[in-house]
Image (cartoon, grey):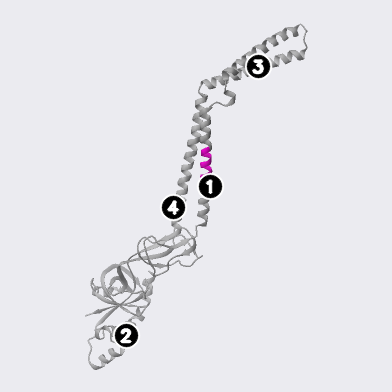
Amino acid sequence: MKKTVLYVLCFAAGVSVAAAALLVWYGKNGEKTVETAAKVQSSAPVEKKRVLTGYGYIRGRSTTTLRNKYGAFVSKVHFYSDAKVKKGDCIIEYDDFDLRKKIISTRNTLANLKQELQQQQTQLQLTRLDPLPSDYRNINWKIKRAKELLDRTENEWLTYDRLHKSQSVSELDWRSRKQAHQDALAAYQIAVSDQLKVNKGLKELRIVQAEQNVELLKVKIAGVEKELALLEEERKYYKIVTPYDGVIVTNSDTVHAWDNAGTAAACIHRTHRGYYVYSYFEEKDIIHIPNGTAGKFFSNDNGKWYDLRSFDVTKTRTATGDKVFHLVKFRVLSQVGKDITMEGNGTVHVVLN
């Protein structure tokens, strides 16, 4: 659209340039100078021909605009405008410092989880070898010992109880024997309760718990690995990479400059089928430029003429002031050298017979 405005604003000035340029073009063999053309005009009558003038720019058959996904500073520029590139070439790199910090942090988290997983796997092996905690080991022997202690303290307390009633022992000794019996009873009850837990599958549950801890860590590790993979994949969005072979025009080629997200960092032109000129003509002239119409393109880059042939007249109307323009596409028939820049502008002339 910016080019359209430029072409229209230059329309009036271009007409005079076109007239002078045509004298050179239509001289003998297309090589006569302005002076030669003047001599021909003075020596013999020349048939006047109507010339249609349009303003356009040279480009590839198709183009792709490459935009950055995230706002960032430009850190490296590998190719500049008009450079030929291959598919996969990195044109521009953006600073991904914050992303790299996230990746390092995620990698550290992953390493810690893997270390913890090794510990839990070792703990699982130990649990399978000895599933019961120390308090539950040899539970049958503990119950037997607790029962013996309970019986002994009970006999002692009963004995001291009779002696206490006859006032043969002191109140303190009686209370001490009574407390010892109560402690032994509590210990025996705990042992019985522990035995019930073992009988209900405490061993098996301890092993299952250890296995679950291992599986939980595996799930966490898998989640962090996916997160890390996404972060690694996200790094590609900090590089502008060419999708195919062609010639590029860079818009963000200043190192350390900031580009907002969605900035058109570069445009790649597909040129394997040659070069093309896109030109704008007034709507009233479109009827005279059917497909296959010959024309000439005068490049403002190098001052050279290039042979053209039209192949597509678009129906899209672009209004500027009181005039309406249509885009006409031309194939460039002449050899295009390195002295012309991609998207370089110029004047298109079509001579009507």
Residue that protrudes farthest toward the bottom in the picture: 43
Amino acid type of the residue tagged 3 in the rendering: Ala
Q: In the rendering, which numbered label is found on residue 108?
A: 1
- Disc 1 versus disc 3: nearer the observer: 1
Residue topped by disc 2: 20
Q: In the rendering, which numbered label is found on residue 184?
A: 3
Determine the residue positioned at 48% across, 42% down.
221
- Disc 2 versus disc 3: nearer the observer: 3
Residue 176 spot, x, y in % from top left = 73, 15
Residue 11 spot, x, y in % from top left = 35, 78
Instruction: Give yes or no for residue 84 being in the magenta stretch.
Output: no
Q: Is residue 206 visible?
A: no
Amino acid type of the residue tagged 4 in the rendering: Glu
State the separation of the CA atoms marked 4 and 1.
Answer: 18 Å
Dot placed on the residue nearer the N-terminal end, 1 or 3? 1
State the separation of the CA atoms marked 2 and 4.
Answer: 57 Å
User: What secondary structure characterizes most of the magenta part?
Assistant: helix
Q: In the rendering, which numbered label is found on residue 232?
A: none
- Disc 4 versus disc 1: nearer the observer: 1
State the separation of the CA atoms marked 4 and 3.
Answer: 67 Å
For the residue labelled by badge 4, is the local secondary structure a helix, a strand or a loop? Answer: helix
For the residue labelled by badge 2, is the local secondary structure a helix, a strand or a loop? Answer: helix
Amino acid type of the residue tagged 2 in the rendering: Ala
Where 292 falls versus 64 (above or below)?
Answer: below
Q: In the rendering, which numbered label is found on residue 233?
A: 4
User: Magenta residues?
Assistant: 105-118
For disc 2, the neighbor class at 10 Å (few under 14, some 14 to 19, many from 20) is few
